[in-house]
Amino acid sequence: MQSRMSLPRAAPDAQQAVLALHAYVEGCGLEHSLLELVKIRASQINGCAFCLHMHVRDARKAGVSEDKLAVLPAWRESPLFSERERAALEWTEALTLIANNHVPDAVYEAARAQFSEAELGKLTVAIGLINTWNRIAIAFRYVHPA
């Protein structure tokens, strides 16, 4: 597979805007391991190999276990995830697949039970950002390193 184009070369100002949001999310105060789980789950749903390659490695560095990474696509059936992680993953799926059901009240209530308003706002921006990165990487066929 060969990349179609490079956003940093084609539109460096757009790349810088996305990187600025990335810097905000990385420093927003949410647990790094939680953010990596969210990034991986959205990337699994979207089928973004480039982002999966990157964020699985980052999750390992953040202390996410191999067992948890292995069962992430089936997180609902696994006892390995905390209630906070479950709420974040359900919120991630609802936002990533927003055209299917928008965001049901029950999903919002579950997220609000685990996250403050500020945290949920930050988590929502993080989910929006990984979906943006997925769309950039998929549209331009970014190829992950071997």
Image (tube, rainbow, N blue to C red):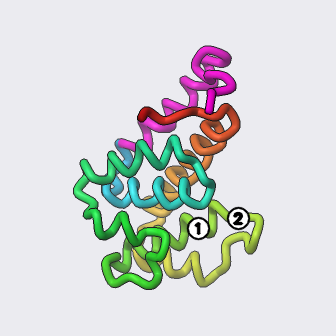
Q: Is 106 on the left or on the right of 58, as rendered?
A: right
Give the extent of the magenta segment: 1-26
Write down the quadrant of residue 77 in the picture: bottom left
* Residue 142 placement, left or right of 34: right
Q: Nearer the viewer, residue 124 or 70?
A: 70
Residue 72 - label: none
Residue 69 screen position, x and y as percent: 36, 64
Q: Which residue corresponds to the image point at 40% horizontal and 48% vertical from the top-left?
A: 55
In the rendered image, the vertical position of residue 55 relative to residue 66, given as above or below? above
Gap in angstroms between the C-alphas marked 1 and 2: 8 Å
- The answer to if 101 sits in the magenta stretch is no
Quadrant holding the N terminus: top right
Residue position for label 1: 93
> What's the amino acid at mark 2?
Ile
The image shows residue 68 at horizontal and vertical percentages of 33, 69
Q: Residues within 10 Å of mark 2 (few under 14, many from 20)?
A: few
SS at circle 1: helix
Residue 53, by quadrant, is top left
Type of secondary structure dominating the magenta stretch: helix
Which residue is painted at 40% across and 75% down in the image?
A: 114
Instruction: Say which residue label 2 marks.
Output: 98
Q: Could you say which is closer to the camera, residue 28 or residue 13?
A: 13
Q: Residue furthest right?
A: 99
Instruction: Tell me what residue is drawn at x 62 percent, y 43 percent.
Output: 132
Task: Give above or below for 72 relative to 44.
Answer: below
